[in-house]
Image (cartoon, rainbow, N blue to C red):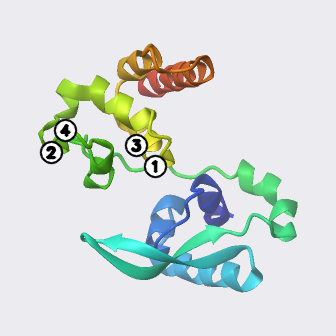
Amino acid sequence: MKVLAAFNMNPFGFRSRRAVAATAGISPTTASAIVDRLVEQGLVVAVPALLRNNGRVTHGRIFEANRINKALSEILDDVLAMRLPAPRTTAKAKIVPRRFWHLFWNAQPAQLPIIEHADFIASRMLLSRDPLAVSWAITHLPASSIERTASLRQVNERDRQWLLGLARARRESVEA
């Protein structure tokens, strides 16, 4: 169940069995065996994908939950009840990761320290509609920067409410 819970928590899937193991809090050997079994049962699919590795594009696969499998919907309550270990804390990011630099077309992202330019970074990332950029921003940027993005003139009311909700959630997660 821990492995299925890990897949449930990661809608974009996993690039490796080792990543599944880290999220589920189990050994890589155990995760590998379980992922193989779940693929055989049709609960997980291995989707061919183009992956970025060290600046190069390679062919690989992403392991994803097979959300249309009826067997998965039958055990969904058990999967949702499973509690995974808290993710390991990593060092605080100092600049925007390279994978998001395309969002800063008229700036040098390597020269934008987060601590000094959090508001600008938040506006670019949160208004990009890139789910991975949004996820990174709400995890690494202060709630105050998310709130300032919500107050921008170009943000419509629906998005403003969504951003304010994200800021509240970010503030609560930092306080917890």
What x and y, as percent, mark residue 117?
Answer: 22, 27
Residue at the disc numbered 1: 132
> Which quadrant of the figure has residue 71?
bottom right
Identify the amino acid type marked 1.
Leu
Distance (Cα) linking label 4 and label 3:
19 Å
**Neighbours of disc 4 within 10 Å: few (<14), some (14-19), many (20+):** few
User: At numbered mark 4, what does the secondary structure look like: helix, strand or loop?
Assistant: loop
Q: Earlier in the sequence, mark 1 or mark 2?
A: 2
Query: Residue 110, which numbered label?
Result: 2
Residue at the image point whose x is 44% and y is 34% from the top: 126
User: At numbered mark 1, what does the secondary structure look like: helix, strand or loop?
Assistant: helix
Residue at the disc numbered 3: 136
User: At numbered mark 3, what does the secondary structure look like: helix, strand or loop?
Assistant: helix
Judge from the rendering whether residue 58 lies leftward or rightward of residue 60; answer left or right: left
Residue at the disc numbered 4: 107
In the picture, the quarter occupied by the N terminus is bottom right
> Which quadrant of the figure has residue 7?
bottom right
Q: Earlier in the sequence, mark 3 or mark 2?
A: 2
